Image: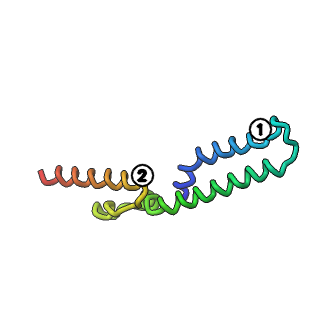
Amino acid sequence: MSLFWREQTPLLLFYLIQMSLFPLIYWLEGYNGWSAPAYSVFLSLFLLVCYLIYRYASHRAFYRCLTRNVESLESSLQKTGNAPLPNAFDQYVERQFQLYNGEIIQ
């Protein structure tokens, strides 16, 4: 899970900067209340949390694969998910495995 948070750190930092600008934008527009800016921030926070949950759920096997020790070459060939990044990683590992087997056979 720590790999997930390290990967999401730039997104979270950008989000914090963006959310700090919401009240400033409302203030510059002349809006003096705090209900609309707070609603905007909390709605955006809710959407961010939903995205992070989806992202972690769709990449969970991928992160698990990257953080555990490899016990055998065949165990490294297991599928790590259906999202584009895990699929690309699976194809890369499979190509490496085929190349390694080809070099061993020669």
Q: Quadrant of residue 25?
A: top right
| Measured Cα–Cα span from mark 1 to mark 2 | 36 Å
Residue identifier under label 2: 85
Helix, strand or loop at mark 2: helix
Residue found at the very far right of the displayed protein: 32
Counting from the top left corner in percent of width and height, residue 3 is at 52, 54
- Which residue position holds label 1? 25
Element at label 1: helix
The image shows residue 97 at horizontal and vertical percentages of 25, 54
Left or right: 15 as drawn, with respect to 103? right
- The structure residue drawn at horizontal position 54% and vertical position 60%, both measured from the top left corner, is 54
Residue lying furthest left: 106
Local crowd size for mark 1, using a 10 Å CA cut-off: few (<14), some (14–19), many (≥20):
few
Which mark, by number, is residue 61? none
Kind of residue at disc 2? Leu
The x, y position of residue 5, in whole percent, is 57, 53
In this rendering, the answer to whether 11 lies above or below 67 is above
Report crowding for label 2: few under 14, some 14 to 19, many 20 or more residues within 10 A (C-alpha): few
